[in-house]
Amino acid sequence: MTPLTLDFISDISCPWCAVGLSALNLALERVRPDIAVTLRFQPFELNPAMGPGGQDITEHLTQKYGSTPEQQAQIRDAIRARGAAVGFEFHPDGRGRIYNTFDAHRLLHWAAEAYPAQQAGLKLALLQACHRDRLAMDDPEVLVAIASLVGLDAVRARQILAGDEHAEAVRARQSLYRSAGVSSVPTVVFNERHLLAGAQTLEVYERVMRDLAAAT
């Protein structure tokens, strides 16, 4: 088997990240007989200044991008179709709120250290809670419940969220990738050298991994 390391840089609140990860997971199933992939999740915040309680999604997108509700509905339909093609279900109602995701990234960093085999499960569960279930992603009890659902220690998760553990490490990782030129998500970095931005199809992810493995 050829070893390959993938750093998946993304934000919980990004719907395209859910699509990209789902496509990548399908591609990983295809290449695993030939390639030993180590998948790691790295933090990126689209809205680091978002306050407690979040903001209405339509209002937020209008303010940030100048898009109309009609344009947003068309984009949501496209995202929903892409998600369905790779097995990710989005909430049928486009209304909802967008939240600060820094605490979710802190939990993911903790999982990478304490439960490395379960970090991927936590990442997917967080994306589902955000985009399928429309849960409040800045609510500590919501985050604790998600952590517990995938087998992490709920008591320890609550302790982490009550303080500032892993905050410095998360900010350092964000700074690292921004300084390396990552300005949008999802972005995948292969073997800490090759960068692929955007939510790609599973065929693209598979081809890139096989090409890199062959070159290695």
Image (cartoon, rainbow, N blue to C red):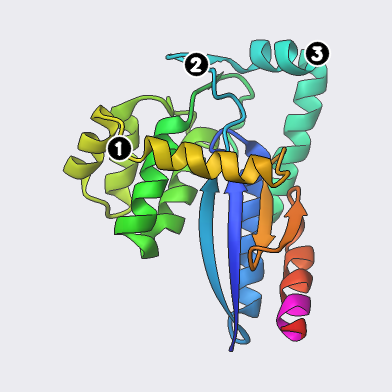
Asked which quadrant contains residue 77, the reply is top right
Q: Residue furthest bottom?
A: 1
Question: Marks 2 and 1: which is nearer the front?
Answer: 1
Mark 2 Cα shell of 10 Å, populated few (<14), some (14-19), many (≥20)? some
Please tell me which of labels 1 and 3 falls first in the chain: 3
* Residue at figure coordinates x 49%, y 29% from the top left: 134
Numbered badge on residue 66: 3
Magenta span contains residue 2: no
Mark 2 — residue?
A: 54
Magenta span contains residue 213: yes
Q: Position of residue 110 (x, y in %)?
A: 34, 49
Q: Is residue 111 left or right of residue 126?
A: left
Going by the numbered disc 3, the residue's amino acid type is Gly
- Judge whether residue 89 can be spotted in this image: no
Going by the numbered disc 2, the residue's amino acid type is Gly
Numbered badge on residue 165: 1
Q: Position of residue 74 (x, y in %)?
A: 81, 28
Mark 3 Cα shell of 10 Å, populated few (<14), some (14-19), many (≥20)? few
Q: Which residues are magenta?
A: 210-214
Q: Secondary structure at mark 2?
A: loop
Q: CA distance from mark 2 to mark 1?
A: 22 Å
Going by the numbered disc 1, the residue's amino acid type is Glu
Pointer 2 with pointer 1, Cβ within 8 A = no
Q: CA distance from mark 1 to mark 3?
A: 36 Å
Q: Position of residue 145 (x, y in %)?
A: 29, 39
Question: Marks 1 and 3: which is nearer the front?
Answer: 1
Q: Quadrant of the N terminus?
A: bottom right
Residue 129, above or below 113: above
